[in-house]
Image: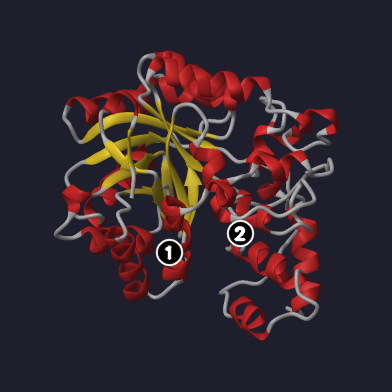
Amino acid sequence: MKYRKLGKTGLMVSEIGFGGEWLERHEEAESVELMRYAAEKGINIVDCWMPDPKSRDIIGKAMEGNRDKWIVQGHLGSTWQDGQYVRSRDMNFVKPAFEDLLKRMRTDYIDLGMIHYVDSEEEWERSMKGEFFDYVKELHEKGIIRHIAMSTHNPRMAKLAAKSGIIEVILFSINPAFDMKPATENLDDMFEDYGEELSGIDRERAELYQLCEENDVGITVMKGFCGGRLFDAKSSPFGVAFTPCQCIHYALTRPGVSSILCGYDTKEQVDEAVSYETATDDEKDYASVIASAPLHSYKGQCTYCGHCRPCPVDIDIAMVNKFYDLAVQQGKVPDSVKAHYEALSHTASECVGCKGCESRCPFGVEIADKMEKAAELFGC
Protein backbone atom coordinates (compact mmCIF):
# COMPACT_ATOMS: atom_id res chain seq x y z
CA MET A 1 0.00 0.00 0.00
CA LYS A 2 1.20 3.49 -0.84
CA TYR A 3 0.54 6.42 1.49
CA ARG A 4 0.11 10.11 0.77
CA LYS A 5 0.32 13.22 2.92
CA LEU A 6 -3.17 14.57 3.60
CA GLY A 7 -2.67 18.25 2.93
CA LYS A 8 -1.44 20.44 5.74
CA THR A 9 -2.60 17.93 8.38
CA GLY A 10 0.64 16.01 7.80
CA LEU A 11 -1.27 12.74 8.26
CA MET A 12 -0.15 9.90 6.00
CA VAL A 13 -3.20 8.14 4.58
CA SER A 14 -3.51 5.03 2.43
CA GLU A 15 -4.30 5.76 -1.21
CA ILE A 16 -7.14 3.27 -0.94
CA GLY A 17 -9.48 4.07 1.95
CA PHE A 18 -12.56 2.55 3.56
CA GLY A 19 -16.01 4.08 3.04
CA GLY A 20 -18.04 2.54 5.83
CA GLU A 21 -21.63 3.18 4.78
CA TRP A 22 -22.44 -0.43 3.85
CA LEU A 23 -21.18 -2.00 7.07
CA GLU A 24 -24.65 -2.06 8.60
CA ARG A 25 -25.96 -4.25 5.77
CA HIS A 26 -24.14 -7.29 7.18
CA GLU A 27 -23.93 -9.15 10.43
CA GLU A 28 -21.83 -7.25 12.94
CA ALA A 29 -19.10 -9.90 13.24
CA GLU A 30 -18.80 -10.11 9.45
CA SER A 31 -18.39 -6.34 9.07
CA VAL A 32 -15.89 -6.13 11.92
CA GLU A 33 -13.83 -8.85 10.24
CA LEU A 34 -14.08 -7.05 6.89
CA MET A 35 -12.69 -3.82 8.32
CA ARG A 36 -9.89 -5.66 10.10
CA TYR A 37 -9.07 -7.43 6.86
CA ALA A 38 -8.81 -4.06 5.13
CA ALA A 39 -6.37 -2.93 7.82
CA GLU A 40 -4.23 -5.99 7.13
CA LYS A 41 -4.06 -4.87 3.51
CA GLY A 42 -2.70 -1.49 4.58
CA ILE A 43 -5.90 0.59 4.55
CA ASN A 44 -5.74 3.12 7.39
CA ILE A 45 -8.44 5.74 6.76
CA VAL A 46 -12.17 5.23 7.33
CA ASP A 47 -15.10 7.58 6.80
CA CYS A 48 -18.13 7.39 9.08
CA TRP A 49 -20.82 9.80 7.97
CA MET A 50 -23.43 7.31 9.17
CA PRO A 51 -25.21 8.20 12.42
CA ASP A 52 -26.82 4.79 12.97
CA PRO A 53 -25.64 2.93 16.10
CA LYS A 54 -24.80 -0.33 14.30
CA SER A 55 -22.31 1.20 11.85
CA ARG A 56 -20.59 3.14 14.60
CA ASP A 57 -20.40 0.11 16.88
CA ILE A 58 -18.86 -1.96 14.09
CA ILE A 59 -16.15 0.59 13.39
CA GLY A 60 -15.42 0.96 17.09
CA LYS A 61 -15.05 -2.79 17.59
CA ALA A 62 -12.94 -3.15 14.45
CA MET A 63 -10.52 -0.46 15.68
CA GLU A 64 -10.36 -1.70 19.27
CA GLY A 65 -6.75 -2.17 20.30
CA ASN A 66 -5.55 -0.45 17.11
CA ARG A 67 -7.13 2.99 17.30
CA ASP A 68 -3.80 4.71 16.69
CA LYS A 69 -3.42 2.90 13.37
CA TRP A 70 -6.65 4.35 11.97
CA ILE A 71 -7.39 7.85 10.69
CA VAL A 72 -11.09 8.52 11.23
CA GLN A 73 -13.31 10.96 9.36
CA GLY A 74 -16.20 11.58 11.76
CA HIS A 75 -19.05 13.86 10.74
CA LEU A 76 -20.62 16.72 12.70
CA GLY A 77 -24.20 17.40 11.70
CA SER A 78 -25.11 13.84 10.74
CA THR A 79 -27.70 12.89 13.37
CA TRP A 80 -29.94 9.95 14.26
CA GLN A 81 -33.53 11.02 14.94
CA ASP A 82 -36.36 8.56 15.54
CA GLY A 83 -34.31 5.78 13.98
CA GLN A 84 -33.37 7.69 10.82
CA TYR A 85 -30.57 9.85 9.46
CA VAL A 86 -31.16 13.60 9.47
CA ARG A 87 -28.65 16.29 8.52
CA SER A 88 -28.91 19.00 11.17
CA ARG A 89 -27.19 22.07 12.62
CA ASP A 90 -29.50 22.05 15.65
CA MET A 91 -27.26 21.64 18.69
CA ASN A 92 -29.98 19.67 20.48
CA PHE A 93 -29.17 16.90 17.99
CA VAL A 94 -25.63 17.68 16.82
CA LYS A 95 -23.90 17.47 20.19
CA PRO A 96 -25.51 14.19 21.36
CA ALA A 97 -24.81 12.66 17.93
CA PHE A 98 -21.13 13.53 18.10
CA GLU A 99 -20.82 12.34 21.70
CA ASP A 100 -22.45 9.09 20.59
CA LEU A 101 -19.87 8.80 17.80
CA LEU A 102 -17.01 9.02 20.30
CA LYS A 103 -18.63 6.54 22.66
CA ARG A 104 -19.45 3.91 20.05
CA MET A 105 -16.09 4.24 18.37
CA ARG A 106 -14.43 3.78 21.78
CA THR A 107 -12.22 6.80 21.30
CA ASP A 108 -11.67 10.22 22.82
CA TYR A 109 -10.72 11.95 19.58
CA ILE A 110 -11.56 12.09 15.88
CA ASP A 111 -8.76 12.79 13.43
CA LEU A 112 -10.87 14.66 10.87
CA GLY A 113 -13.95 16.43 12.19
CA MET A 114 -16.10 16.67 9.05
CA ILE A 115 -18.69 19.43 8.84
CA HIS A 116 -21.29 17.25 7.19
CA TYR A 117 -22.78 17.81 3.72
CA VAL A 118 -22.48 21.50 2.82
CA ASP A 119 -23.86 21.84 -0.70
CA SER A 120 -25.28 25.38 -0.85
CA GLU A 121 -24.32 28.90 0.19
CA GLU A 122 -27.16 28.89 2.71
CA GLU A 123 -25.80 25.70 4.28
CA TRP A 124 -22.30 27.18 4.28
CA GLU A 125 -23.57 30.18 6.25
CA ARG A 126 -25.43 27.93 8.72
CA SER A 127 -22.37 25.73 9.17
CA MET A 128 -19.64 28.35 9.49
CA LYS A 129 -21.39 30.69 11.93
CA GLY A 130 -23.30 30.54 15.20
CA GLU A 131 -23.58 27.77 17.78
CA PHE A 132 -22.73 24.98 15.37
CA PHE A 133 -19.36 26.37 14.34
CA ASP A 134 -18.62 27.51 17.90
CA TYR A 135 -18.98 23.85 18.87
CA VAL A 136 -16.65 22.76 16.05
CA LYS A 137 -14.02 25.29 17.19
CA GLU A 138 -14.40 24.19 20.82
CA LEU A 139 -13.82 20.55 19.90
CA HIS A 140 -10.80 21.54 17.83
CA GLU A 141 -9.28 23.67 20.58
CA LYS A 142 -9.66 20.79 23.02
CA GLY A 143 -8.05 18.35 20.60
CA ILE A 144 -11.18 16.22 20.41
CA ILE A 145 -11.15 16.78 16.67
CA ARG A 146 -7.58 17.11 15.46
CA HIS A 147 -8.40 18.78 12.13
CA ILE A 148 -11.44 20.63 10.77
CA ALA A 149 -12.79 19.18 7.52
CA MET A 150 -15.92 19.41 5.37
CA SER A 151 -17.89 17.18 3.00
CA THR A 152 -19.63 18.48 -0.12
CA HIS A 153 -20.71 17.48 -3.62
CA ASN A 154 -20.62 21.06 -4.91
CA PRO A 155 -17.29 22.37 -6.26
CA ARG A 156 -18.24 25.97 -5.49
CA MET A 157 -18.72 25.18 -1.82
CA ALA A 158 -15.51 23.17 -1.88
CA LYS A 159 -13.68 26.19 -3.30
CA LEU A 160 -15.01 28.34 -0.45
CA ALA A 161 -13.67 25.74 1.98
CA ALA A 162 -10.28 25.59 0.27
CA LYS A 163 -9.96 29.39 0.48
CA SER A 164 -11.23 29.66 4.06
CA GLY A 165 -7.96 28.98 5.83
CA ILE A 166 -10.03 26.95 8.31
CA ILE A 167 -10.90 23.76 6.45
CA GLU A 168 -7.89 21.45 6.14
CA VAL A 169 -9.51 18.51 4.33
CA ILE A 170 -12.43 18.24 1.92
CA LEU A 171 -14.40 15.05 1.30
CA PHE A 172 -15.52 15.50 -2.30
CA SER A 173 -17.30 13.40 -4.93
CA ILE A 174 -14.94 12.63 -7.81
CA ASN A 175 -15.30 10.36 -10.81
CA PRO A 176 -15.10 10.85 -14.60
CA ALA A 177 -18.87 11.34 -14.95
CA PHE A 178 -19.07 14.05 -12.31
CA ASP A 179 -15.99 15.87 -13.59
CA MET A 180 -17.44 16.16 -17.07
CA LYS A 181 -20.41 18.18 -15.77
CA PRO A 182 -20.49 21.95 -15.27
CA ALA A 183 -20.60 23.07 -11.65
CA THR A 184 -23.88 24.37 -10.30
CA GLU A 185 -25.23 25.57 -6.99
CA ASN A 186 -28.57 24.06 -7.96
CA LEU A 187 -28.05 20.36 -7.41
CA ASP A 188 -31.45 19.64 -8.93
CA ASP A 189 -29.82 20.57 -12.24
CA MET A 190 -26.61 18.65 -11.62
CA PHE A 191 -27.33 15.92 -14.11
CA GLU A 192 -29.14 17.70 -16.90
CA ASP A 193 -27.92 16.83 -20.40
CA TYR A 194 -24.16 17.11 -20.69
CA GLY A 195 -24.13 18.15 -24.33
CA GLU A 196 -20.64 19.12 -25.45
CA GLU A 197 -19.47 19.60 -21.85
CA LEU A 198 -18.80 15.87 -21.69
CA SER A 199 -15.80 16.36 -23.95
CA GLY A 200 -13.57 17.79 -21.21
CA ILE A 201 -13.25 18.28 -17.46
CA ASP A 202 -15.41 21.05 -16.04
CA ARG A 203 -13.50 24.27 -15.38
CA GLU A 204 -14.87 24.76 -11.85
CA ARG A 205 -13.78 21.31 -10.75
CA ALA A 206 -10.36 21.65 -12.36
CA GLU A 207 -9.91 24.98 -10.54
CA LEU A 208 -10.94 23.34 -7.26
CA TYR A 209 -8.32 20.60 -7.54
CA GLN A 210 -5.60 23.11 -8.39
CA LEU A 211 -6.70 25.40 -5.56
CA CYS A 212 -6.52 22.56 -3.04
CA GLU A 213 -3.05 21.61 -4.22
CA GLU A 214 -1.82 25.21 -4.03
CA ASN A 215 -3.32 25.79 -0.56
CA ASP A 216 -2.26 22.36 0.72
CA VAL A 217 -5.87 21.37 1.45
CA GLY A 218 -6.22 17.60 1.34
CA ILE A 219 -8.96 15.87 -0.65
CA THR A 220 -10.47 12.51 0.21
CA VAL A 221 -12.79 11.06 -2.41
CA MET A 222 -16.35 9.77 -2.15
CA LYS A 223 -18.59 8.49 -4.98
CA GLY A 224 -15.51 7.31 -6.88
CA PHE A 225 -17.48 4.56 -8.59
CA CYS A 226 -20.58 6.72 -9.21
CA GLY A 227 -22.62 4.25 -7.15
CA GLY A 228 -21.36 1.39 -9.34
CA ARG A 229 -22.89 2.98 -12.44
CA LEU A 230 -19.57 3.26 -14.22
CA PHE A 231 -19.01 -0.50 -14.12
CA ASP A 232 -21.84 -1.21 -16.57
CA ALA A 233 -22.03 0.18 -20.10
CA LYS A 234 -25.83 0.33 -19.84
CA SER A 235 -25.78 2.64 -16.82
CA SER A 236 -22.53 4.48 -17.51
CA PRO A 237 -23.10 8.02 -18.85
CA PHE A 238 -20.29 7.35 -21.31
CA GLY A 239 -21.98 4.29 -22.78
CA VAL A 240 -18.93 2.19 -21.91
CA ALA A 241 -17.85 0.42 -18.73
CA PHE A 242 -14.93 1.33 -16.51
CA THR A 243 -13.11 -0.99 -14.11
CA PRO A 244 -12.63 -0.22 -10.40
CA CYS A 245 -8.92 0.17 -11.11
CA GLN A 246 -9.58 2.82 -13.76
CA CYS A 247 -11.95 4.74 -11.47
CA ILE A 248 -9.44 4.62 -8.62
CA HIS A 249 -6.66 5.85 -10.89
CA TYR A 250 -8.83 8.68 -12.18
CA ALA A 251 -9.48 9.94 -8.65
CA LEU A 252 -5.90 9.56 -7.48
CA THR A 253 -4.54 11.51 -10.44
CA ARG A 254 -6.57 14.64 -9.59
CA PRO A 255 -4.40 17.37 -8.01
CA GLY A 256 -4.79 17.52 -4.23
CA VAL A 257 -6.27 14.04 -3.83
CA SER A 258 -4.78 11.83 -1.13
CA SER A 259 -7.19 8.91 -0.80
CA ILE A 260 -10.26 7.38 -2.44
CA LEU A 261 -12.74 5.87 0.01
CA CYS A 262 -14.24 2.77 -1.57
CA GLY A 263 -17.26 0.91 -0.27
CA TYR A 264 -16.92 -2.83 0.37
CA ASP A 265 -19.30 -5.72 0.90
CA THR A 266 -16.72 -8.52 0.71
CA LYS A 267 -13.03 -9.26 1.18
CA GLU A 268 -12.83 -9.90 -2.55
CA GLN A 269 -13.87 -6.29 -3.17
CA VAL A 270 -11.14 -5.11 -0.80
CA ASP A 271 -8.63 -7.23 -2.72
CA GLU A 272 -9.85 -5.80 -6.02
CA ALA A 273 -9.41 -2.22 -4.81
CA VAL A 274 -6.01 -2.86 -3.25
CA SER A 275 -4.83 -4.60 -6.42
CA TYR A 276 -4.60 -1.10 -7.86
CA GLU A 277 -1.21 -0.82 -6.16
CA THR A 278 0.25 -3.52 -8.42
CA ALA A 279 -1.79 -2.80 -11.57
CA THR A 280 -0.11 -2.12 -14.90
CA ASP A 281 -0.37 1.18 -16.74
CA ASP A 282 -2.72 -0.47 -19.23
CA GLU A 283 -4.99 -1.66 -16.41
CA LYS A 284 -5.10 1.85 -14.97
CA ASP A 285 -5.74 3.58 -18.31
CA TYR A 286 -9.07 5.41 -18.16
CA ALA A 287 -8.22 8.02 -20.79
CA SER A 288 -8.64 5.69 -23.75
CA VAL A 289 -12.06 4.65 -22.42
CA ILE A 290 -13.23 8.26 -22.24
CA ALA A 291 -11.69 9.14 -25.59
CA SER A 292 -13.56 6.38 -27.42
CA ALA A 293 -16.86 6.77 -25.57
CA PRO A 294 -20.01 8.21 -27.17
CA LEU A 295 -21.55 11.24 -25.48
CA HIS A 296 -24.45 10.36 -23.20
CA SER A 297 -26.71 12.33 -20.90
CA TYR A 298 -26.89 11.54 -17.21
CA LYS A 299 -29.85 12.61 -15.12
CA GLY A 300 -31.47 11.31 -11.97
CA GLN A 301 -29.23 8.33 -11.25
CA CYS A 302 -29.18 7.12 -7.64
CA THR A 303 -25.74 6.78 -6.07
CA TYR A 304 -27.18 5.27 -2.85
CA CYS A 305 -25.79 8.08 -0.70
CA GLY A 306 -28.73 8.08 1.74
CA HIS A 307 -29.28 11.84 1.79
CA CYS A 308 -32.89 11.26 0.72
CA ARG A 309 -33.73 10.22 4.27
CA PRO A 310 -35.69 10.47 6.52
CA CYS A 311 -38.71 8.69 5.04
CA PRO A 312 -42.05 9.11 6.86
CA VAL A 313 -42.72 5.36 6.55
CA ASP A 314 -39.07 4.42 7.21
CA ILE A 315 -38.28 2.96 3.78
CA ASP A 316 -34.54 2.45 3.23
CA ILE A 317 -34.72 4.24 -0.11
CA ALA A 318 -31.07 3.77 -1.04
CA MET A 319 -31.28 0.02 -0.50
CA VAL A 320 -34.55 -0.32 -2.44
CA ASN A 321 -32.93 1.54 -5.34
CA LYS A 322 -29.81 -0.59 -5.15
CA PHE A 323 -31.76 -3.86 -5.26
CA TYR A 324 -33.93 -2.52 -8.09
CA ASP A 325 -30.88 -1.49 -10.13
CA LEU A 326 -29.23 -4.86 -9.54
CA ALA A 327 -32.41 -6.67 -10.56
CA VAL A 328 -33.10 -4.79 -13.80
CA GLN A 329 -29.57 -5.45 -15.03
CA GLN A 330 -30.47 -9.16 -15.24
CA GLY A 331 -32.79 -10.92 -17.65
CA LYS A 332 -34.61 -12.35 -14.64
CA VAL A 333 -34.70 -11.02 -11.10
CA PRO A 334 -32.06 -13.06 -9.22
CA ASP A 335 -33.50 -15.03 -6.30
CA SER A 336 -30.80 -13.68 -4.01
CA VAL A 337 -31.64 -10.06 -4.84
CA LYS A 338 -35.37 -10.73 -4.42
CA ALA A 339 -34.76 -12.39 -1.06
CA HIS A 340 -32.65 -9.48 0.17
CA TYR A 341 -35.30 -7.02 -1.00
CA GLU A 342 -38.11 -8.93 0.72
CA ALA A 343 -36.07 -8.96 3.93
CA LEU A 344 -36.18 -5.17 4.14
CA SER A 345 -38.27 -3.89 7.03
CA HIS A 346 -40.24 -1.68 4.65
CA THR A 347 -40.57 -2.17 0.90
CA ALA A 348 -41.34 0.20 -1.97
CA SER A 349 -45.05 -0.62 -1.96
CA GLU A 350 -45.34 1.32 1.32
CA CYS A 351 -44.27 4.59 -0.33
CA VAL A 352 -46.90 7.30 0.24
CA GLY A 353 -45.64 9.46 -2.64
CA CYS A 354 -44.94 12.53 -0.49
CA LYS A 355 -41.75 13.26 -2.48
CA GLY A 356 -40.04 14.83 0.53
CA CYS A 357 -37.10 12.57 -0.29
CA GLU A 358 -36.83 14.08 -3.77
CA SER A 359 -36.31 17.56 -2.32
CA ARG A 360 -33.30 16.24 -0.38
CA CYS A 361 -31.72 14.17 -3.16
CA PRO A 362 -28.47 15.81 -4.38
CA PHE A 363 -28.77 14.04 -7.74
CA GLY A 364 -32.33 14.75 -8.86
CA VAL A 365 -33.63 11.19 -8.69
CA GLU A 366 -37.39 10.81 -9.27
CA ILE A 367 -37.69 8.61 -6.20
CA ALA A 368 -41.47 8.24 -6.00
CA ASP A 369 -41.57 6.97 -9.57
CA LYS A 370 -38.76 4.57 -8.83
CA MET A 371 -40.57 3.24 -5.77
CA GLU A 372 -43.56 2.43 -8.00
CA LYS A 373 -41.32 0.57 -10.42
CA ALA A 374 -39.60 -1.36 -7.63
CA ALA A 375 -42.94 -2.36 -6.07
CA GLU A 376 -44.14 -3.61 -9.46
CA LEU A 377 -40.91 -5.48 -10.18
CA PHE A 378 -40.66 -7.23 -6.81
CA GLY A 379 -44.40 -7.53 -6.18
CA CYS A 380 -44.35 -5.82 -2.81
In this rendering, position of residue 83 left or right of residue 243? left
Q: Gap between marks 2 and 1, in whole Å?
A: 25 Å
In this rendering, position of residue 61 left or right of residue 276? left
Give SS at disc 1: helix
Q: Which residue is mark 1?
A: 271
In this view, 188 is above or below 206: below
Residue 325 picture quarter: bottom right
The three-letter code of the residue at mark 2 reads Ala
Q: Which residue is mark 2?
A: 318
Instruction: Please report the residue visible at 27 percent of the width from the left and 37 percent of the height from the top.
Output: 12
Mark 2 or 1: in front is 1
Q: Residues within 10 Å of mark 1 (few under 14, many from 20)?
A: some
In this view, 348 is above or below 247: below
Q: Residues within 10 Å of mark 2 (few under 14, many from 20)?
A: some
Q: Residue 165 appears at what percent x and percent y?
A: 37, 14
Q: Residue 310 appears at what percent x and percent y?
A: 56, 53
Instruction: Please report the residue visible at 75 percent of the width from the left and 69 percent of the height from the top.
Output: 329
